Amino acid sequence: MFKNYIKVAWRNLFRNKGFTITNVLGLAIGITCTMLIVLWVQDELTYDRFHQEHDNIYQVIANRDFNNQVFTDRSMVLPLAAELEKNIPQVKRAVVTTYPQQRVLTLGDNRIKKQGLFVSEHYFDMFTWKFIKGNAATALKDPNSVVLTRSAATTYFGDADPINKVLRFDNIKDVKVSAVIEDVPGNSSFRFEWLVPFNYDEEDTKRAMNEWQSSSWNVFVQTVPGTDTALLNKNITKLKRAHGNDDISTYFAFPMNNWHLYSDFNDGVNTGGMIEYVRLFSIVAIIILLIACINFMNLSTARSEKRAKEVGIRKTLGSQKKQLILQFFAESMILTVIAFFLALVAVLLLLPSFNQLVDKQLTIQFSQPFFWLTALGIVLFTGLVAGSYPALYLSSFKPVKVLKGTLTQGKGSILPRHVLVVSQFVISILLISATIVVYQQIQHVKDRSMGYDPDNLIMIPATEQTNQNYAVIRQELLSSGMVSAVTRTSSPITEVWWNTGAPDYEGKPANSQIIMGALATDIGFTTTMGVKMLQGKDFAGTPADSASMILNQAAVDAMKLKNPVGMQMRFGRTFNVIGVTDNIVMTSPFEPAYPMLIIFDPNGAAMNTLRLKSGISPQKALASIETIFKKHNPLVPFEYQFVDQEFQRKFLTEELISKLTNIFAGLAIFICCLGLAGLASFTIEKRIREIGVRKVLGATVQQLLLLISKEFLKLVMIAFVIAIPLTWWAMSTWLQRYTYRIDISIWLFAVVGAVILLLTLVVVSMNTMRAAMRNPVKSLRTE
């Protein structure tokens, strides 16, 4: 019996090639999109899950309340880890790491800057990495050892065994390779190519181990299984407050499973993160698949008259309704299986480009049960959903009416099809609107004034040698004819590395706790950066600069100062406020400008910033600049960053979402148009004799176009009325995540409505024109 179902289904599909090709193409595109999204979503959901103890690993972070504004901070004090492990029973072990750092590792003439971490000795007891050489127990025992990733080891030693080989570390000390591990996977929150253990005998580390106020470390804990995290959070806060005045901070353990997906905090509350996009594109995948299924339903029921006699004859010969339902499901499943294998080929072909787009290394794991279960789920879901309504509808025909030729399609049969078409239009309007809103939001922020001029601005990392020779380097750069201004700062202009409370000043409220960013700089800061002075003056390069301070407008507003210039402020020592700058956007461009204080302190500068002369070739300028830096800093590779390019990196997530939305929205709309074309074709075929009669009676082509299009245009208008409030709510909710955002304009819906109407008219007209231009004699020959 099953074999017969397949045989008959295949014969019917082969007989109706146009119907089959249209449905297979629509389903294949839908399944392709779904599979690509599933691969991306799976990668996002498995972040950090390769660590054996991922369910029990937490990062200690704090909510710090500054003047009723809660700031979530991941930076901890160095001695906290040891105290947690010693005094809190729920903590099995605690580990400390630095933030990622760029250091030069040298072997002979091979000097390359690599990113890595300084870590505590038991790092590998907590985190799981695959060892190629060496072992976890001894890899970090020696403070003068280094663990390399496979790629880093190959860079220096090729295929040779690197164990016990010596590298020069940042031209400060020699380190011996103790182990080699696999490269860090793409779905890891850690990013490094080397690991070096802390040397607790060094003076800087000794001082940090007794410092309970300065926070610049990451602290991780591994808990005993089943730990009550609420009690753990309470104990961590109590312990930290016992070691210093820290009443403004509340500490808590942030689970590893949430690091990537729930990384965003707003006013101390976890507001999500990538999980929002995971949910969004999961919904998009289901929507695209449903659109393809709706196409199948519409086309199957639209051609019901062609299948009516078949159903009538089969029922007359004794076929039961259940058997007919199975027959139609068989056709649906065959189409779905064919579409799935076409989609699989498409995914394999598209995956390299998709990986480049999303910056991942996604692969189809044919050997994994997850792939086959997912594939089976997609096929069954698509086949059953697509085939359900046609199977139930077609199998319900009465054989007497069918064979007498009295079967007509009343409102009861047309209404469900109209509902499905309206649903497709609603989804299309929502997707097009979302694409436009995401684009407008990104452009709105990109067009925002940054408070400085990022064009022709270059950042070059500072070293001990460049700081010692800064005066000479600066003079040679300005004399080169390539550079118009030079300065140096304690952090890049695109990031805030130094957070602090507001300085003390006369009249400061007793309970005032304002979080601010701090930046130390040298002369030429405003000139080089292109920052506008609103009040007062810039640093002049005089001895008085060391006791001078500049505030930005956001800091003035936060502290509610009316005339800040001339005020004295206590920030470690006494400073005199000499100026106020325009707001400089150094943190997220989607958020309000950060309050900043700027002091004159060239010691310990981390970044040299140069402004190229306009009209100069960047390649020519960089060659000249590299020569100067290599002359005074020969042991460190020359590296640079264009500020405008670095600033653009702040939009990576939003631009990725925008691109993915554009692609999948475009494909979803294409599937809708494909179904609309098929439905229009069958509608015209059903009314071909009517069209012939009207043409004989004098109807023009334009009148016939209006006759056929009118039904579809009504459906578009209904969909538009339904989609407007849905779209407004959905996009307003998305925009709430940004403080600096656009307002949704009514013109958005006018544009989207016009696009959908135009698409509908084009698709329907293309099919109608063929019928309208046809000789009516051919249509009426059989009458």
Image (spheres, helix red, strand yellow):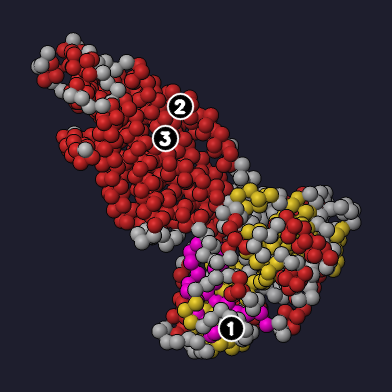
Q: CA distance from mark 1 to mark 3?
A: 59 Å
On screen, residue 82 above or below 35: below
* Disc 1 element: loop
- Give residue 30's position: percent from left, percent from top: 35, 43
As rendered, which of 566 and 438 lies closer to the eye?
438
Which label sits on residue 720? 2
Q: CA distance from mark 2 to mark 3?
A: 10 Å
Quadrant, the N terminus: top left
Q: Which residues are magenta?
A: 177-199
Check if residue 232 falls in the magenta segment.
no
Asked whether residue 577 is in view, the answer is no
Q: Residue at x 46, y 83 (%)?
A: 156
Amino acid type, label 2 = Phe
- Give residue 682's position: percent from left, percent from top: 24, 26
As rendered, which of 766 and 601 lies closer to the eye?
766
Q: Are dots 1 and 3 in contact, CB under 8 Å?
A: no
Residue 740 found in image quarter: top right
Q: Residue at x 35, y 16 (%)?
A: 411
On screen, residue 12 above or below 55: above
Disc 2 packing (10 Å; few <14; some 14–19; many ≥20) = many
* Secondary structure predominantly adopted by residues drawn in magenta: loop
Residue 245 found in image quarter: bottom right
Residue on which disc 1 sits: 138
Residue on which disc 3 sits: 428
Q: Residue at x 42, y 44 (%)?
A: 285
Amino acid type, label 1 = Thr
Disc 1 packing (10 Å; few <14; some 14–19; many ≥20) = few
Single out the mark in the foreground, 1 or 3.
Answer: 1
* Disc 2 element: helix
Check if residue 192 falls in the magenta segment.
yes
Amino acid type, label 3 = Ser
